[in-house]
Image (cartoon, grey):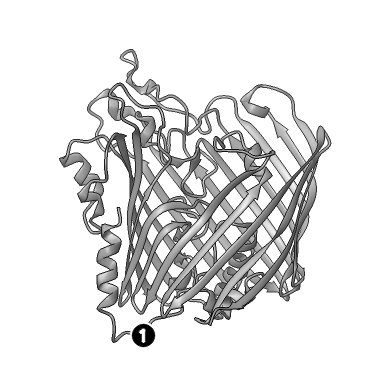
Amino acid sequence: MLRPFAILAIVAGSLTSVAAETSRSAPLGTELSTWLYRQANRDLARDTMLSLRDWSLGPIGIAKLSSTAGYDRWSTLNRSRLWVAGGVAAFTEARDDRRVISRELLGGEVGGEPFRGVSFYVRAALDERRAADPLYDGKKWRGLAGDVDAAVVRYRATGLHAAVGRFAEYWGDPQSMIFAGSQPLDGIAYRLTWGRFTLSYRLARLDGDESADSTGMTINRYVAAHRLDWSLSPDVTIGFTEAVVFGGAGRQIELYYLNPILPYHAAQLNEDVNDNTLLAIDVSARPFSGIHLFTQLLIDDFQIDSESAGDREPAQYGFVGRVLWAEVLPRIDIEARYTRVTNWTFNQIEARNRYVSDGNPLGSALGNDYDEVRGRIGRWLSSDLVLDAAVSYRRQGAGRVDAPWTAPWLDPDLTDYSEPFPTGVVETTLRSTIGITGWPTPWLFIAAEGGIERVRNRNNEPVSSISDLVANLSVQLRLERLIDID
């Protein structure tokens, strides 16, 4: 698995005449990092420090952010110092139909840049929320689940960025359906920039099936993906992505999936293997100062022919569109997003080929067979504190990513087959909240919201509407330090 990165190291070593960039990136995968990227998107819309190329392939270099709240010393690190950060957090959720639930987290981070262009970053936590997650099947200690959710070494130079270890990254947007910034994976990644083009590659191991098959071999699972970004202009970037989930009993990484320029769908057809490929195209644009648009279409399966029963399989796709209008009025932003994912998307006849890891989609999708519209108005009280009013409406059908693959379109008694959207009894959720988020002081982060949630047909059962008062509070105390090591 390290061979591709070894090749990259040789390439990197040959770039002695090329000046290396600061290799430190703004972390992904935490509430604090989500805040950083929200501020970065504001910068992008307002034509400040970021370009669309910077935004489209995360993580973003920390030096390109105008605000580094929570990571101020990480942004000023030099080679003679070690960066450490840590703190405690409390998360509280309350509804009027159940008791208050509180969870705690104790976390720490460490990082450094020992060589020019080379950095490392490690993040670990003891998390009560993770221990309470029904999808978590790891070890627990006194109601806490401990894990290292980031441990990565990065190399940056002009035209090259490579990473190896456990890390999260996104392609296109933090809310991309291919890779989102919330899912760390073990593997390698690199991207090469040539003029207006950037070629990206990622390979990672997914959660395997610990139960062995009849041969006694463990079922291994992997994801490989490649992407081409084309900067049509400083204000328009288009990205083309192909990903494949593959695996099997004792199966190892295939050499053809290490090729960043080989079409994976053609390879799996020619090799006569049943892997799961997905395609996506996305566009990021800044048509006017203050406005950033992002849209993405993901295609899991689409039938071209109509000659057999299998050709009646419904189209499986996902779509997301998002617009941010920063400073529509002084200190006021408006953001809206629409997401749609059809039934059976991310699923497959072989459970090992589902586009998930630890039960969650690898991208930003909340599953399948749903659509959702969200809107938010933000009033910035300071550069690091915002007051939000938000509303969302979601329709969730009966389909699930982990549903058995029943293939009803193969019924020989059918002459035609179609599915409504969403399918079955539809659960609808209308949610309206007011909240405040940010850093009231340099060492305290808060995210508080309260509002009302109205749910109809909860859990896809035909029941009357239920209205709940909801409240969520996150409080995090955080300290950073730089330690001299010379």
- Left or right relative to 387: residue 457: left
The extreme front residue here reads 486
Q: In this view of the protein, can residue 392 be seen by the observer?
A: yes
In terms of image quadrants, where is residue 261? bottom left
Tell me: 68 left or right of 162.
right
Q: In percent of the image, x 49 and y 54: which residue is there?
A: 180
Report x, y in % for residue 396: 58, 34
Q: Amino acid at mark 1?
A: Ala
Depth check, front residue: 481 or 100: 481
Residue 38 place in picture, x, y as percent = 61, 65
Q: Residue at x 45, y 45 (%)?
A: 318
Disc 1 on helix, strand or loop?
A: loop
Number of on-image labels: 1
483 or 387, which is in the foreground?
483
Residue 303 higher or lower than 77, as above or below: above
- The percent position of residue 73, horizontal first and vertical second, equals 62, 76
Give the labeled residue for mark 1.
Answer: 19
The image position of residue 350, as x and y in percent, is: 35, 30
Q: Is residue 32 left or right of residue 454?
A: left
Seen in the picture, residue 157 relative to 9 is either above or below; the reply is below
Determine the residue located farthest toward the top in the rendered image: 413
Judge whether residue 69 can be spotted in this image: no
Q: Quadrant of residue 301?
A: top left
Say if 92 sits above or below 368 in the image. below
Residue in front for this viewpoint, 163 or 306: 163
Mark 1, Cα crowd under 10 Å, few <14 / some 14-19 / many 20+, is few
Viewer-closest of 22 and 437: 22
Which residue is at 33% across, 24% downward? 213
